[in-house]
Image (cartoon, rainbow, N blue to C red):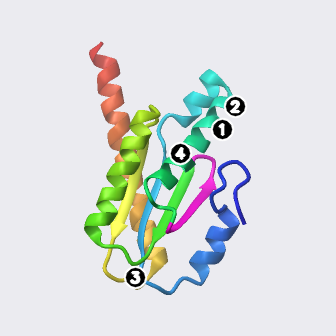
Amino acid sequence: ELDGLTGLLNQSSYLNKTASFNQDAILMVFDLDDFKDINDQYGHLKGDQCLVEVADSIRNAYFNDGLCYRIGGDEFVIIQSSIEELEFHNRINRLQEYMKQDQISISIGFLWKASCENLEDMLKEADHRMYEAKKAYYQTADRRTHNH
């Protein structure tokens, strides 16, 4: 099933896929930084526009050959198989560049492994990495605010 707003796969598809996944996986989990502030300050229409731009950036970064999900509000998961580590990192860099061009900040937790023994464990690790990136983002943002 597709997410009506972004055209990416939705949370229901994500849950079905992760329950039956049995191939090698490389994955990335990310969400938008300050998304609540965007909605509060500019309205939900602007927030929706940001989510559509994120989906477009995912496709433009050539992740459309993987499984790309919007699993909730502003949280996205990409599960990719059969990709070399260098190419995976190149795609992440492209995604980040597209986001910068759209002035959207994201926190990413990604994981590349040659083989996937347990997708759920990989997802937990990537999710943990995303929250570490988010924590670092907000610490940096706090420092910038206090320095002015």
Disc 3 crowd rating (10 Å Cα; few below 14, some 14-19, many 20+) is: some
Q: Quadrant of residue 3?
A: bottom right
Left/right placement of residue 5 relative to residue 31 reads right
| C-alpha distance separating marks 4 and 3 | 27 Å
Residue that carries the numbered disc 1 in the rendered image: 48
Left/right placement of residue 28 relative to residue 45 reads left
First-in-chain label (4 vs 1) = 1
Q: With respect to residue 13, does 109 lie above or below?
A: above
* Along the line of sight, the residue nearer the viewer: 52 or 32: 52
First-in-chain label (2 vs 3) = 2
Q: Secondary structure at mark 2?
A: helix
Q: Nearer the viewer, mark 3 or mark 1?
A: 1
Q: Secondary structure at mark 1?
A: helix
First-in-chain label (4 vs 3) = 4
Q: Magenta segment range?
A: 65-74
Residue that carries the numbered disc 2 in the rendered image: 45
The N terminus, quarter of image: bottom right
| C-alpha distance separating marks 3 and 1 | 33 Å
Q: Nearer the viewer, mark 4 or mark 3?
A: 4
**Dominant secondary-structure state across the stretch colored magenta:** strand
Asked whether the beta carbons under mark 2 and mark 1 sit within 8 Å of each other, the answer is yes
In the rendering, at what x and y percent does residue 79 appear? 48, 69
At horizontal 30% and vertical 23% (from top left) the residue drawn is: 144
First-in-chain label (4 vs 2) = 2
At horizontal 66% and vertical 76% (from top left) the residue drawn is: 16
| C-alpha distance separating marks 4 and 2 | 14 Å
Residue that carries the numbered disc 4 in the rendered image: 54
